[in-house]
Amino acid sequence: MRLVTSFIAVIGLASVSLAQSASTGERELERIIKDRPAMDGILPRDDVIVRWVVRRLATGSNGETVKWDPTEPDLGMAQHVPSRRNAPAMVRITSSPDMSGQDKWYLLVFELHNLMHPAIAEGFERAARLPNVGQAEFVNALLDYEYERMARTNKFFIRYPIPSATKENAPFYFHALESRMELFKRSARDAMISRQSDTEYGKNVVDLYSAWYRQIRASPRSSGIRRAEQWDAHEGRESGQSVWPESFARPR
């Protein structure tokens, strides 16, 4: 499966004035635009990217609302936290002026693609507890998971490009579409092997998921993570993914 980075792309809602009757997804998007005004006006309200983001904010990966958190990401330019028990999923995007509105749209869309279904998160946690799954294998599986989500995001933007994006006003957007995936994966792999990386981000990603592995191994088994039986009705069916991480052998 593929890893977990933190990107999130988004819309420009110059024309999105939300009334009390606005949907949950529209209200969350309005909050994003208010806190990240560079995204405003990039896309019209009826744009396919906007409509996809609104729907994804309303339903997440498992039918539950994704909440906007204006806090700066702990790692990288964007971040998500999957839903757990009674806590909703959350997304964050950087406020850095170095990232244009178009770039922030890419980050939002990526992070919404990257949302980990609770059943997938549970699968990773179950796998990490297996005696034959080491830290390197666990981190590798997460890298693969995120790599696939990057590929989905790039396919999405190749099909539905941001009309106003140029290499001058959206350097991250174009860099991501052209080379980000391979650079990211190589950087993270290098960090795993030698603790060195051509980017500090690659090293930080490895550290983050290594820490998750150690935390899972050190903690008692949890029965509180939702099984999310509705998995097949959502992303799992269309992507052909299993609840059990594909990178690990199923227990006999």
Image (spheres, grey):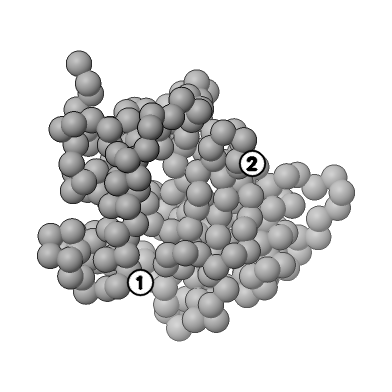
Farthest residue, direction right: 20
Q: If you read the primary sequence from the N terminus, does the residue marked by circle 1 or circle 2 appear first?
A: 2
The quarter of the rendered structure image containing the C terminus is top left
* Vertical relation: 10 (above or below) 122: below
Give the quadrant of residue 178: bottom left
Residue at x 49% of width, y 70% of height? 103
Residue at x 21% of width, y 46% of height? 135
Report, in whole angstroms, how far the alpha carbon at label 1 lies from the one at label 2: 30 Å
- Horizontal relation, residue 202 to residue 100: left or right: left
Query: Callout 2: helix, strand or loop?
Result: loop
What residue did someone put label 2 on? 65
What residue did someone put label 1 on? 175
Q: Position of residue 57 (x, y in %)?
A: 62, 47
Task: Specify the amino acid type for callout 2.
Answer: Thr
Other residues around mark 1 within 10 Å, as few (<14) / some (14–19) / many (≥20):
few
Query: Callout 1: helix, strand or loop?
Result: helix
* Number of the label disc, if any, that sits on residue 70: none
Residue at x 32% of width, y 65% of height? 204
Q: Position of residue 101 (x, y in %)?
A: 57, 73
Q: Is residue 162 visible?
A: no
- Horizontal relation, residue 190 to residue 91: left or right: left
- Horizontal relation, residue 7 to residue 91: left or right: left
- Horizontal relation, residue 90 to residue 223: left or right: right
* Vertical relation: 86 (above or below) 16: above
Other residues around mark 2 within 10 Å, as few (<14) / some (14–19) / many (≥20):
many
Task: Specify the amino acid type for callout 1.
Answer: His
- Front disc: 1 or 2: 2
Give the quadrant of residue 58: top right
